[in-house]
């Protein structure tokens, strides 16, 4: 298996509501057959009905809510951008689950949950440089050893 991710699909209760939320964050997508596709750098971010996603994956999902053991993250270029995005998300209806704060790794980050409970971390991490296109480069951790 190649080491890459092509799509991230979120199962949502209401595709229209979820699309409106992400549009309030400044995202622009295309809706096709009750599925919304956003180009997100080198991968696609997709919103699809939770029931359809579960059925497609062969999973019986009684609509459980709560933390699913996964977060999505967007690294940004500054502390100020973290604060700005957290405020935009809250205004759009997100629940701020962790206000922006200094982190153990020398960065600055906060977390919010979208209307379906999917958790996002917005982080500035000086150890993970971003390219001009926003692409993150994982540093060579063995070089410091």
Image (cartoon, rainbow, N blue to C red):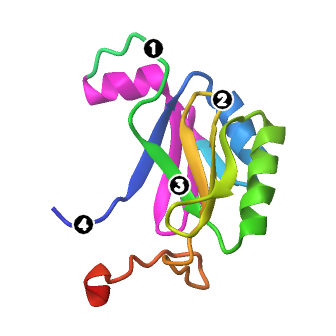
Mark 1 vs mark 2, CA separation in Å: 14 Å
Rate crowding at label 1 as few (under 14), some (14 to 19) or many (20 or more) other CA atoms within 10 Å.
few
Q: Which residue is mark 3?
A: 73
Which sits in the foreground, 100 or 73? 100
Which sits in the foreground, 52 or 2? 2
Q: Which residue is mark 2?
A: 115
Q: Where on the picture, by quarter, is residue 6?
A: bottom left
Q: Which residue is mark 1?
A: 63
Which sits in the foreground, 98 or 16? 98
Mark 4 vs mark 3, CA separation in Å: 18 Å
Mark 1 vs mark 3, CA separation in Å: 24 Å
Q: Compared with residue 35, is residue 3 higher up or lower down, i.e. above or below?
A: below
Mark 2 vs mark 3, CA separation in Å: 16 Å
Specify the quadrant that holds the N terminus: bottom left
Which badge, 4 or 3, is on the more N-terminal residue?
4
Which badge, 2 or 4, is on the more N-terminal residue?
4
Q: Is the Cβ of the residue at disc 1 closer than 8 Å to that at disc 3?
A: no
Q: Secondary structure at mark 4?
A: loop
Q: Compared with residue 90, is residue 87 higher up or lower down, i.e. above or below?
A: below
Q: Which residue is mark 4?
A: 3
Q: Residue at x 58, y 75 (%)?
A: 134
Q: Secondary structure at mark 1?
A: loop
Q: Say whether residue 53 is magenta.
A: yes
Rate crowding at label 2 as few (under 14), some (14 to 19) or many (20 or more) other CA atoms within 10 Å.
some
Which badge, 2 or 3, is on the more N-terminal residue?
3
* Residue 100, horizontal then vertical, whole percent: 69, 52
């Amino acid at each position: 298996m190649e080491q890459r991710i092509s799509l991230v699909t979120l199962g949502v209760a209401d595709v229209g509501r979820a699309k409106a939320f992400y549009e309030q964050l400044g995202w622009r997508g295309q809706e096709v057959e009750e599925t919304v596709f956003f180009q997100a750098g080198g991968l696609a971010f997709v919103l699809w009905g939770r029931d359809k996603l579960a059925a497609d994956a062969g999973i019986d999902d009684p609509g459980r809510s709560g933390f699913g053991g996964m977060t999505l993250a967007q690294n940004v270029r500054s502390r100020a951008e973290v604060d700005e995005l957290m405020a935009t998300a809250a205004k759009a209806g997100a629940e701020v689950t962790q206000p922006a704060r200094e982190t153990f790794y020398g960065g600055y980050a906060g977390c919010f949950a979208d209307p379906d409970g999917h958790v996002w971390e917005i982080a500035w991490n000086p150890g993970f440089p971003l390219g001009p296109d926003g692409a993150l480069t994982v540093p060579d951790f063995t070089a410091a050893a």
